[in-house]
Image (tube, grey):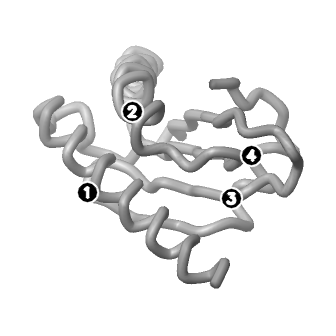
Amino acid sequence: MRTLSKRSEFLAANRGLRFPMPGFVLLVRPRGDDEDALGIGYTVSKKVGNAVTRNRMKRRFRELARAALPEAGIAGADHVLIGRPGANDMEFAELGEHLDSALKRAAKKLAAKAS
């Protein structure tokens, strides 16, 4: 898994598929290169809260991605988690279920698009 760090990578992911969930929005975009590595990025705007709140949310997202993406992530695609207000108030297990659901929807949609 590689971490997205450049603005251009986030802008490219924004042109991909969106899967809104209660605590976050998942963006998925196949890179189109031959590399099978998963890309992951996290973004939480100031609308969500102060720095402590935003960093806590990013820590939770990192742990969710570490657990879920190796099994359910889409190889050769970039994934971006965008934090929404209230995600820190949700149970961690509930966020995990939402992420699994979003990844399944993404895989299904990309498979349908490919055929």
Report the side of 106 relative to 24 (left or right). right
Which quarter of the rendering shows the C terminus?
bottom right
**For the residues marked 2 and 4, what is the alpha-carbon distance in whole angstroms?**
21 Å
Q: On the rendered structure, is 77 left or right of 80?
A: right
Foreground pick, 65 / 49: 65
**52 or 108, nearer to the observer:** 108
Report the label total.
4
The answer to whether residue 46 is left or right of residue 8 is left
Return the residue at label 4: 10
Dot 4 crowding, Cα within 10 Å, few <14, some 14–19, many 20+ = many
Q: How much space separates mark 2 and mark 3, taking CA atoms?
A: 27 Å
Lower position in the chain sequence, tag 2 or tag 3: 3
- Looking at marks 4 and 1 on the same chain, the residue that comes earlier in the sequence is marked by 4
Residue drawn at x 23%, y 40% is 95
Mark 1 vs 3, N-terminal side: 1
Residue plotted at (26% across, 40% down): 87
Label 2 is placed on what type of residue? Gly
Badge 4 marks a residue whose secondary structure is helix
